[in-house]
Image: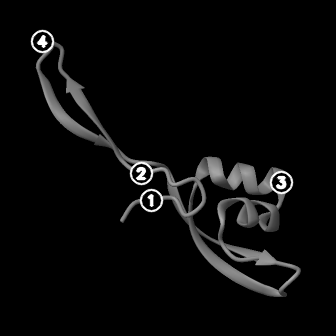
Amino acid sequence: MKVCDITGKRAMSGNNVSHSNTKTKRRFYPNLQDKKFFIPEEGKWIKLRVSAKAIKTISKNGISAVLRKSGLSA
């Protein structure tokens, strides 16, 4: 399923709008990446499926702090 492990972002629904203003349903998917992060306290790597926004948050605050705040291990 396309859900971010950190932020919980998931697909949204909306409309494609044509030039003639005809509306058809479509989905907006989050920008998810499969990424490995190293946790220095535990000395191990973890694999997460995270959004681009979550990668920026991890870069700013550190993986351990983000995992603690999200309720995952570490």
Q: Position of 17 compared to 72: left or right?
A: left
Residue 51, by quadrant, is bottom right
* Quarter-of-image position of residue 19: top left
- Left or right of residue 44, residue 33 in this image: left
Name the residue tied to disc 2.
10
Q: Earlier in the sequence, mark 3 or mark 2?
A: 2
Sequence-first tag of 2 and 1: 1
> How far, Cα to Cα, is label 3 from label 2?
22 Å
| Label 2 residue SS | loop
Q: Residue at x 72, y 49 (%)?
A: 56
Element type at mark 1: loop
Q: CA distance from mark 4 to mark 1?
A: 33 Å
Read off the residue under disc 4.
20
Distance between the Cα atoms at labels 4 and 2? 30 Å
Q: Secondary structure at mark 4?
A: loop
Indicate the position of residue 22 as horizontal and vertical percent values.
11, 19
Query: Along the polypeptide, which appears first: circle 4 or circle 3?
Result: 4
Q: Quadrant of the N terminus?
A: bottom left
Residue beneath disc 3? 61
- Residue furthest out toward the bottom: 43
Q: How is the image coloured?
A: one colour
Kindly identify the amino acid type of the residue bearing the numbered disc 2: Arg
Upstream in the sequence, badge 3 or badge 1? 1
Check contact, mark 4 vs mark 2: CB within 8 A. no
Tag 1 or tag 4, which sits nearer the N-term? 1
Q: Give me the residue at 51% from left, 55% from top.
A: 8
The residue that mark 1 highlights is 3
Mark 4 and mark 1 in contact? Answer it, CB < 8 Å.
no
Mark toward the start of the polypeptide (4 vs 2) = 2
Q: Position of residue 35 (x, y in %)?
A: 62, 69
Mark 4 vs mark 3, foreground winner is 3
| Distance CA(mark 2)–CA(mark 1) | 5 Å
